[in-house]
Image (tube, rainbow, N blue to C red):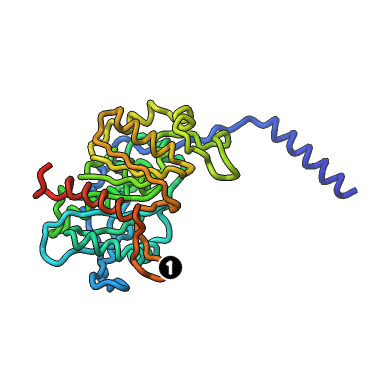
């Protein structure tokens, strides 16, 4: 009886609520006046120097100011001397785990990075904030500072959230302030989501060269990843470039691509479930007249261009990795070392 009475009361309540007028939420907005937008705080970082396991070259673990005035973690390793040196940033996957991820990547990449440093490069391991899926496609321009018409002061008020690729831009801007860095010779390389971040950043900020390794550019190309996208279990299946082409928004993608001035080297992986996305990224960059170079290899490991130690700890690249290392370094040598004829 009590359950029946409770159910009757719920039904009556719902019926009464249905008769009430709907209230439209009010979106409040800043007045156009007030104190002018605050100026951006100059780029800077706070560094802690620590030894790197298995290497004689230490790392400056550094927190770098971002556009919304929080700090993102990186690690800077450099050759001996005053420079100025060219720079290569290295990122893998999505942003997560803060400085812990940076420390782990430095230790795993140290042998590869030591070879890069020996060739005269500053090498920077990067991380960034977590991704907010699909927000990139909703926001049409980078965040900017707003006037303060509420407090009577001059607070830092942002037009919208800062995204993860903007952290990469903040990192490049910070590196350009370092006295031993050639500010016109900064390149970036990244695997998967980090490869997409290089393209997103390059559409908003110029740097000297990018190497995108299996770049997961589904947002950058506005590729359909909804429940209607082809899947095997929970894994999207976009190995076929034609399948990607019919599921991508070319107009939106080309608008972003046209803004890129940075030369790009793109690596695909023949059997990867997203290789069609990697291929289409290269194709549309080339169609837009951009400086783009393409390689694809049949390798069992995602992100194979990043050379990690073997289970026994030895630095032992396989033949494909040896080849890709020389491709990457020759590419950066040509575009970052000004002493080499272009």
- The image quarter in which residue 123 lies: bottom left
Residues 240 and 291: in front is 240
Q: Write the residue at 34% across / 64% down.
A: 316
Q: Residue at x 90, y 48 (%)?
A: 1
Q: Residue at x 67, y 32 (%)?
A: 20
> Measured from the top left, where is residue 286 in percent x and y?
29, 31
Outermost residue, right side: 1
**Where residue 16 sits: x, y (%)?**
73, 34
Q: How many marks?
A: 1
Q: Quadrant of residue 114?
A: bottom left
For the C terminus, the image quarter is: top left
Relative horizontal placement of residue 136, taking residue 146 as reference (left or right) = right
Q: Where is residue 52 drawn, in percent x and y? A: 29, 71
Near-viewer residue (185 or 256): 185
Q: Position of residue 48 (x, y in %)?
A: 27, 69
Residue under the image location 34 percent in, 50 percent down: 190
Residue at the extreme front: 319
The secondary element bearing badge 1 is classed as loop
What residue does disc 1 label?
A: 311
């Amino acid at each position: 009886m009590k359950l029946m009475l409770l159910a009757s009361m719920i039904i009556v309540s719902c019926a009464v609520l249905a008769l009430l007028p709907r209230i439209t939420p009010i979106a409040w907005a800043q007045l156009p006046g007030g104190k002018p937008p605050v100026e951006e705080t100059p780029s800077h970082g706070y560094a802690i120097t620590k030894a790197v396991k298995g290497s004689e070259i230490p790392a400056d673990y550094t927190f770098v100011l971002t556009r919304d005035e929080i700090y993102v973690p990186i690690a800077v390793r450099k050759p001996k001397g005053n420079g100025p040196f060219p720079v290569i940033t290295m990122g893998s996957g999505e942003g997560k785990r803060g400085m812990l991820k940076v420390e782990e990547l430095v230790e795993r990449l140290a042998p590869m990075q030591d070879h890069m440093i020996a060739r005269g490069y500053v090498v920077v391991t990067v991380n960034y904030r977590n991704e907010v899926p699909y927000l990139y496609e909703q926001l049409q321009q980078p965040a900017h500072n707003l006037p303060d018409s509420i407090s009577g002061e001059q607070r830092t008020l942002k037009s919208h959230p800062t995204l993860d690729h903007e952290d990469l831009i903040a990192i490049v801007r910070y590196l350009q302030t370092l006295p031993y860095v050639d500010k016109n010779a900064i390149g970036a390389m990244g695997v998967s989501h980090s490869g997409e971040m290089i393209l997103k950043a390059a559409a908003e900020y110029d740097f000297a060269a990018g190497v995108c390794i299996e770049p997961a550019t589904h947002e950058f190309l506005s590729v359909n990843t909804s429940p209607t996208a082809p899947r095997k279990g929970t894994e999207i299946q976009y190995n076929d470039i034609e399948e990607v082409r019919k599921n991508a928004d070319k107009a939106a993608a080309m608008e972003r691509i046209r803004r890129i001035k940075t030369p790009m080297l793109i690596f695909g992986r023949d059997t990867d479930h997203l290789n069609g996305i990697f291929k289409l990224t290269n194709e549309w960059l080339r169609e837009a007249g951009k400086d783009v170079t393409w390689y694809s290899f049949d390798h069992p490991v995602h992100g194979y261009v990043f050379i990690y130690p073997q289970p026994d700890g030895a630095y032992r690249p396989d033949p494909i990795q040896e080849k890709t290392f020389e491709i990457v370094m020759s590419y950066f040598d040509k575009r970052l070392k000004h002493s080499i004829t272009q």
